Amino acid sequence: MTTKKFLAAALAALACTAAQAQDGAKLYAEKTCVACHGKEGNKPLMAEYPKIAGQNAKYAERQMLDIKSGARANGNTAAMKGVMHLVSDAEIKALSEYLSKLKP
């Protein structure tokens, strides 16, 4: 790979990351995450709902995927199950990345 192609690929990856983070914030509102977890992910509607701001991205992604698939069905996952079927795997990844950057 030439230096020029490498730089172009690196710039495209950075642009994708910035767009993904912006999409994460938009998705957080559109997919109604804000309703239960709070505007910044750190003030949940109910005490038993988790604070998700600052959560490790891979962990958050795995939890959402497991809730969506039914592999995780404990605690308050029933509330999430009703929403997760509306969220694509790519959107889950964007949401996870967004959440990881929020202040706990």
Image (tube, rainbow, N blue to C red):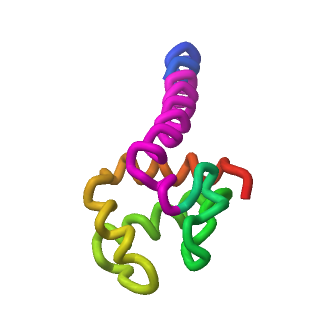
Residue at the top extreme?
A: 4
**Quarter of the figure that contains the C terminus:** bottom right
Residue drawn at (37%, 65%), measured in percent from left and top?
65
- Queried whether the magenta region covers residue 13, the answer comes back as yes
Q: Where, by quadrant of the figure, is residue 46 drawn?
A: bottom right
Q: Closer to the camera, 4 or 69?
A: 69
Residue at the bottom extreme?
A: 74
Q: Closer to the camera, 102 or 30?
A: 30
In the shown orientation, is residue 68 left or right of residue 11? Answer: left
Residue drawn at (38%, 49%), measured in percent from left and top?
31
Picture coordinates of residue 44, whole percent (x, y): 59, 65
In the shown orientation, is residue 85 left or right of residue 34? Answer: left
- Queried whether the magenta region covers residue 18, the answer comes back as yes
Q: Where, by quadrant of the figure, is residue 7 drawn?
A: top right
Q: Closer to the camera, 10 or 33?
A: 33
Residue at the front extreme?
A: 45
Residue drawn at (33%, 79%), measured in percent from left and top?
71
Q: Is residue 79 above or below residue 86?
A: below
Picture coordinates of residue 101, whole percent (x, y): 66, 48
In the shown orientation, is residue 99 left or right of residue 19? Answer: right
> For the magenta stretch, what is the residue range?
10-36
Q: Is residue 17 above or below residue 73?
A: above
Number of numbered labels in the structure image: 0
Residue at the right extreme?
A: 103
Picture coordinates of residue 78, whole percent (x, y): 35, 77
Q: Is residue 1 above or below residue 54?
A: above
Q: Predominant secondary structure in magenta?
A: helix
Residue drawn at (45%, 85%), measured in percent from left and top?
75
Picture coordinates of residue 87, whole percent (x, y): 32, 53
